[in-house]
C-alpha cells in the first residue's frame, strides 16, 4: 500500500511495478499531481525539466527554462497513465494500525490490509505557521495564489528560501512589499540551477536551502526591487497582510496510532524503514528520509532502495 499519489508515491509505484509486487496507491486528492496543483499561479521549479524527472521517463522539455507548476502537473498526470498506476482517488487515510501479518490502513472508504505500507504524504498539507498575535491578515505559502488581491496593501513576506523569494518577486509590482529574512538571502550563481543543490545534498554536504534565481526573482533582484530586511516586529504589526513562507512539517498524523514519532516529530528510520515498525516505510519527507528526497529528481534513489528492501522482505 502506498499512501499518497504525488511525486514520491509515483516513484514508489514505478519500482513496485518493476519488482512485480502487487500494490495500490491511495490518494486524498481528486486529480493527479500531488501538491503541485495547489501552488501559487506563477510557481516555477528551480531546476530545468531534464533535472526534474521521476525514474523511467524524463520530464518533457519546457521552452521557457524553468517549468511551471502546470507543466509538472501535466507530467505527473501522464506518468501515472504511462505506468498504469492502480490509483484510488479521493480516499482519505485516517490512521494506520498493526495487524498480525501486516498493517491495517483505515480510510473514509473502508479498511485495507497490506504486508507493507509506504507513507508518501509529503509536507504541503502541514504548513508551519508561527504563532504571533498580529492584527493584520495572516497567510502562509499554501494560501497564496496571485498578487492581484493585495494591490496597494502593505504586505510582509517572511522567509529566505525559494518560496519566499518567488512570492516576494511576484508581489513587487502590486503591493507595498517588505521582504523579511532571518539572515541575508543566499543566491546561487545565476548560471547554476537546482540540479547543483541536488548534487550537493546527495553527497551529504549540505541541505537544499539556497535561492535559485528563476527569471522573475532575478529580474526583481537586479532592478533593486527585491531587497531583504531583518525581522522587525513593529513592521509585522503594521502590515495589512503577512505571508509566512516558513516551510512545512511532515504530514504524519495518520501514523499516530503506531506511536513512532520522536521529539522532532520525525519517525526514526533506517534508510526509509521505520525503526519501530519494519513494515512501514517513509518516502519523500526530506533529508531524514533520503538526500534530496523531497524533490522530483531526488526521490527516485530512495524509492528504489525502499522497494528493494520490501522485495527482500517478501522473498
Image: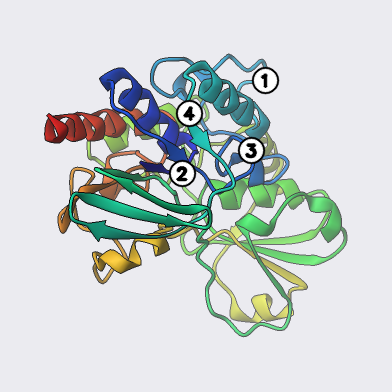
Identify the residue position indicated by label 1 in the image: 64
Report, in whole angstroms, how far the alpha carbon at label 3 lies from the one at label 4. Answer: 29 Å
Q: Residue at x 41, y 27 (%)?
A: 195
Name the element at disc 1.
loop
Q: Quadrant of residue 299?
A: top left
Label 2's element? loop
The disc label shown at residue 31, or none:
3
- Location of residue 5 in the rendering, given as x and y in whole percent from the top left corner: 49, 39
Q: Residue at x 69, y 36 (%)?
A: 216
* 247 or 238, nearer to the observer: 247
Task: Give the spatial CA distance, label 3 vs label 2.
Answer: 12 Å
- The label shown at residue 4 is 2
Q: Residue at x 32, y 54 (%)?
A: 104
The residue that appears at 64% across and 43% down in the rendered structure is: 30
Q: Is residue 220 above or below residue 19?
A: below
Q: Earlier in the sequence, mark 4 or mark 1?
A: 1
Mark 4 Cα shell of 10 Å, populated few (<14), some (14-19), many (≥20): many
**Distance (Cα) linking label 1 and label 3:** 26 Å
The answer to whether marks 3 and 2 mark residues whose Cβ atoms lie closer than 8 Å is no
Amino acid at each position: 500500500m502506498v499512501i499518497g499519489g504525488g511525486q514520491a508515491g509515483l516513484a514508489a509505484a514505478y519500482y513496485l511495478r518493476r519488482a512485480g509486487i502487487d500494490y495500490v496507491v491511495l490518494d486524498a486528492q481528486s486529480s493527479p499531481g500531488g501538491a503541485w496543483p495547489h501552488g501559487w499561479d506563477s510557481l516555477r521549479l528551480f531546476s530545468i525539466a531534464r533535472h526534474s524527472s521521476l525514474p523511467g521517463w524524463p520530464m518533457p522539455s519546457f521552452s521557457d527554462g524553468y517549468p511551471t507548476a502546470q507543466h509538472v502537473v501535466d507530467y505527473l498526470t501522464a506518468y501515472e497513465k504511462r505506468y498504469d498506476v492502480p490509483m484510488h482517488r479521493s480516499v482519505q487515510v485516517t490512521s494506520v494500525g498493526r495487524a498480525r501479518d501486516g498493517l491495517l490502513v483505515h480510510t473514509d472508504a473502508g479498511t485495507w490490509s497490506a504486508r507493507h505500507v509506504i507513507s508518501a504524504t509529503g509536507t504541503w498539507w502541514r504548513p508551519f505557521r508561527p504563532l504571533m498575535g498580529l492584527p493584520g491578515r495572516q497567510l502562509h505559502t499554501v494560501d497564496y495564489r496571485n498578487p492581484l488581491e493585495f494591490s496597494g496593501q502593505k504586505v510582509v513576506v517572511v522567509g529566505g528560501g525559494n518560496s519566499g523569494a518567488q512570492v516576494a518577486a511576484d508581489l513587487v509590482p502590486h503591493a507595498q512589499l517588505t521582504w523579511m529574512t532571518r539572515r541575508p538571502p543566499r543566491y546561487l550563481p545565476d548560471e547554476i540551477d537546482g540540479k547543483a543543490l541536488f548534487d550537493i545534498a546527495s553527497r551529504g554536504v549540505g541541505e537544499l536551502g539556497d535561492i535559485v534565481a528563476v527569471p522573475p526573482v532575478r529580474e526583481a533582484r537586479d532592478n533593486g526591487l527585491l531587497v531583504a530586511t531583518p525581522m522587525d516586529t513593529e513592521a509585522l504589526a503594521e502590515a495589512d497582510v503577512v505571508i509566512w513562507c516558513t516551510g512545512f512539517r511532515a504530514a504524519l498524523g495518520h501514523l499516530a496510532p503506531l506511536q513512532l514519532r520522536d521529539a522532532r516529530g520525525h519517525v526514526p528510520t533506517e534508510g526509509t524503514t521505520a525503526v519501530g515498525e519494519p513494515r512501514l516505510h517513509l518516502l519523500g519527507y526530506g533529508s531524514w528520509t533520503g538526500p534530496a528526497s523531497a524533490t522530483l529528481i531526488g526521490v527516485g534513489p530512495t524509492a528504489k532502495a525502499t522497494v528493494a528492501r520490501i522485495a527482500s522482505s517478501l522473498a
